[in-house]
Amino acid sequence: MAGRSRQQKHSGAKKRQRHGNPQKAHVSRDPRTVEPATFGDWVGAARLRTLPLAVTPILIGTGAALIIDPRFHWVIALCCLIVAVALQIGVNYANDYSDGIRGTDDHRVGPARLTASRKVPARRVLNAALVFFAVAAVAGIAIVIRTQHWWMLLVGAACLVAAWFYTGGRRPYGYAGLGELFVFVFFGLVATAGTTFVQSGAVPQEAWFGGVAAGALACAVLLANNLRDIDQDRAAGKKTLTVRIGKLWTQILYTVLMIVPFAIAAFLALFYPIAWLALLALIPAAAAILIVWTYRHPRELVVALGVTSLTSLGYGALLLWAFVG
């Protein structure tokens, strides 16, 4: 009887061990059994799906600059691109680090993160973020030296501070529902208008309209991401805008943000006829909107996120063509 009792207890313990979070089933808490991160893991943590959001404002801003000055300042434009892409990657690694050490990513729906999966020590992920922030800073300083607009060092410093405190620090604004606002300002208005200014010395209305469009699309990507993680963020105490307003209003806001850029393109087409071609990007945009409204599993929103990001890139390229055509 005693042997049978012990056997039943042992069997019950095994059954209890099977319970837990299915998303974390492949992750071991024992660092000796965690596989080391591969190059592909590092690339995945950089979140390539989001990089088009860094390219879009540079394309639009460069196009607006060519309206003022037909000379193509390719060195400055390239430095602007380096700043934007390096900042985007730096933010992604910083987010991986900050969310990982807080435990926010312990129940992710999307791909596993470097810090949360314990494949890489948190300090190494932080160092990677700092390296990309440094690359962005160096490229930004090069732009300032080339253009002699020294006051723009303050703009660059503000960008770095905003990048870190998205999820870093004691009170990250991304945890207070302000992520979309800062994304709109820095990855929309600042990136687009700044790119135009350093190349032409002025910021025409086209740059501001384009900045609003780029910012709206960037916010839409963030909404799709946060909608995917709404349950996990709510459980972790991460009060994103999506957590605050709920699923339905997030879907509505996402749809509005996806439509606004095309309304802007239609307006700009009155002065730049080629801008009508930007409406071609409505095709992938409509597909992304459909996914956001009809998804049944949060993982489907990963596709919507990627499609939205590519929509942004196509839109930016077509608007550039409209400005220079």
Image (cartoon, rainbow, N blue to C red):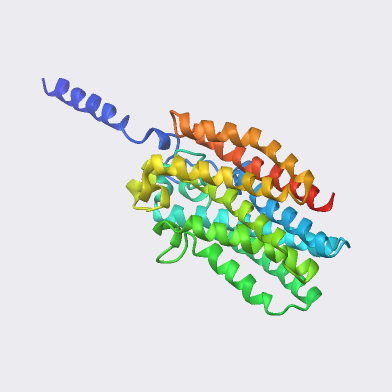
Q: Position of residue 48 (x, y in %)?
A: 64, 45
Establish if 181 lies above or below 28: below
Q: Position of residue 208 (x, y in %)?
A: 66, 61
Q: Residue 152 sits in which quadrant? A: bottom right
Foreground: 183 or 125? Answer: 183
Residue at point 37%, 48% (across, down): 245
Residue at point 63%, 51% (across, down): 213
Residue at point 79%, 66% (across, down): 199
Establish if 43 lies above or below 196: above
| 248 left or right, relative to 95 | left
Foreground: 315 or 9? Answer: 315
The reply to whether residue 261 is visible in this rendering is yes
Q: Position of residue 225 (x, y in %)?
A: 50, 44
The reply to whether residue 124 is visible in this rendering is no
Quadrant in which the N terminus appears: top left
Q: Position of residue 127 (x, y in %)?
A: 58, 61
Residue at point 52%, 39% (across, down): 111
Q: Residue 130 sits in which quadrant? A: bottom right
Count of marks, rendered view: 0
